[in-house]
Image (cartoon, grey):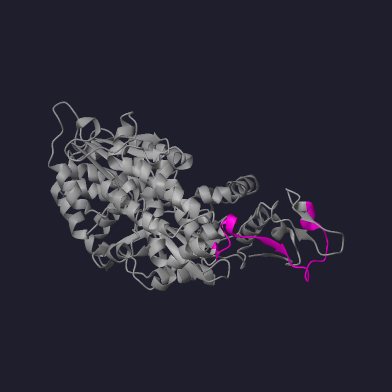
Amino acid sequence: MGKPKILVGLGSCGIAAGGQAIYDHLKQTVPADLADIEITSCIGMCWAEPLVEVVGTAGGTERTLFGYVDPAFSDQIWQGLQAGKLPDEKRVRESQDGKDYLEKQVKVVLRNCGVINPEKIEDYLATGGYEALKKCLNEYTPQQVIDIVKESGLAGRGGAFFPTATKWGLFAANPAPEGGHKYLVCNADEGDPGAFMDRATIEGDPHGLLEGMLIAAYATGADRGYVYCRAEYPLAIKRLKRAIEEAEKRGFLGEDIMGKDFAFHLKIKEGAGAFVCGEETALMASIMGRRGMPTLKPPFPAVSGLFESPTNINNVETFENVAYIINRGPAEFNKYESNGTIGTKVFALAGKVKRAGLVEIPVGMTIRELVEHIGGGSSTGLPLKAVQMGGPSGGCIPERLFDMTIDVKSVTGTGAIMGSGGFIVMDEQTCMVDVAQYFLTFVQSESCGKCTFCRIGTKRMLEILHRITAGKGEAQDLDRLQELAAAIKKSSLCALGQLAPNPVLTTLKYFPEEYEEHIREKKCRAKVCKPLIKYAILADTCTGCGACLRGCPVKAISGEKRKPHTIDADKCTRCGLCKDTCKFAAIDVF
């Protein structure tokens, strides 16, 4: 009878929530001959971290997942395992929250995340790992592999949704230069605020990425590869390096792979975190040690890319789909379809939502199903206002459109984009003008500066938004924003500039009344823009306890003990500390 396993979720989210302390505690207290204490990664339930899962009670394969675990409760788990009855409380998968979160998801890319130990190749092999590569090498020609991917309908998940098989076919048609190489690159330079899909996927299933890249290399004739991953993902890089070493030792990477005349060598290139390096020509420039700036096409990378050699670039999620398609067949993948978009999509569900985390849904699900059923709805109890899809280059979709399906055609029709999977939920406390300002600030600061309209145009747009949120906007500013946006979209070289105005344009389109209020009434209905709000103490409610007075960092509050206090509007910096401090709801914002 095999020993049971106790898995501790140690993705970045689990570690941040305290999972490492739980793992260390269990390693110290649980005898190694009675149970194996191992790590796993993010299963997607970031809202319930730290997570601990018991696998194989009484020698079986049953899995029991516990959430909100602390070291004391981990002792209860171990005691229950010894007694033959695990605790009933904190069972996440069996709770209503867990059922709602998981029942409508379809795990393809995330099939191994939170299930296996990502630092052990044996765990990946036990799930059928590298069997898809073996099948390709033994049963299919390179063209047949491309044909299978074409039949599946897989499209690039980095944001462009270009057909993967078409991209591979164009790349395969170009031979390596004499004495040179063909390069396959994985774009893991995930830079969207609030996005963590690629990071979590690599942390949880690094061999899934390697196998997808190996199959792509075989299909296209590539013999060299890079994973371009930002250095801000140290855990992902650590586990990927370990996976590469393990794959090389097992003969899955290197020369004569699986005894066949097929070679592929892979390196990791750590990026410095420039958002523009998500664009493929800027990414290649960075790999070659140059400044990350986009270049004109043609030549396209498939003809002349890295080191002037044929190059193909796909993102993490795209490659993670490949082994599944080979093993299960294209029909199993393309049975999910909506308006021409096929398969599943991974999203980083974040913001004002109860159950934030990593989700994978079949295309065609509605925004409302994702936000309210899987995500559990508003975390603040306030009505939801919008979602931001596609990161800083995406757009805001209002609540009245939440019943639309999630697919490329539907989302693009709103003015937003699917992007790589950023998905931020906003409630009524969100100022949409401030949201536009936030995302444009990010894009403007990340512009490489090559294009005048991107470099200067976004700055002019940002200056207008600063004026509006400061109560100094003019009616003509709305026309100026539209004119600048049109010019920037038309004249920018790469997608960073072409899509930069999207947050402004979509908020102007769906929330024009908020812009009008900021300009004409000098009012922010969400009470977010500090120059447009005031703090006041309600005389009828104030008890004169003095807590706000003592906590005010600029001494803007005055008053006698046990008598109503007042706020000097000229001194007040609108930091909100007084409102947070007051226990009697005696401070109002208007």
Residue 147 visible within the image? yes
| The magenta stretch spans residue 549 | yes
Foreground of the two, 322 or 389: 389
Image coordinates of residue 522 in percent, x first then y, are 54, 61
Residue at (36% x, 34% y) in the render: 269
Q: Picture coordinates of residue 31 (x, y %)?
A: 62, 47
Q: Name the magenta segment's main secondary structure.
A: loop
- Name the quarter where the C terminus is drawn: bottom right
The quarter holding residue 368 reads bottom left
Name the image quarter holding residue 541: bottom right
Which range is magenta?
A: 522-550
The picture places residue 131, in percent across and down from the top left corner, at 28, 50
Q: Is residue 229 above or below residue 165?
A: above
Work out which residue is located at the far right of the displayed protein and give it.
Answer: 561
Residue furthest top in the image:
179
- The reply to whether the magenta stretch includes residue 389 is no
Give the percent coordinates (x, y) of residue 528.
57, 59
Apparent side of residue 445 relative to residue 416 in the rendered image (left or right)? right
Q: Is residue 272 above or below residue 139?
A: above
Quarter of the figure with residue 279 = top left
- Name which residue lies at 15% across and 47% down: 169
Q: Relative to 451, is 415 above or below?
A: below
Residue 394 visible to an observer of this rendering: no
Total numbered circles: 0
Q: Residue at x 73, y 56 (%)?
A: 568
Would residue 389 appear left or right of 48 to someone viewing this image? left
Q: Residue at x 42, y 38 (%)?
A: 242
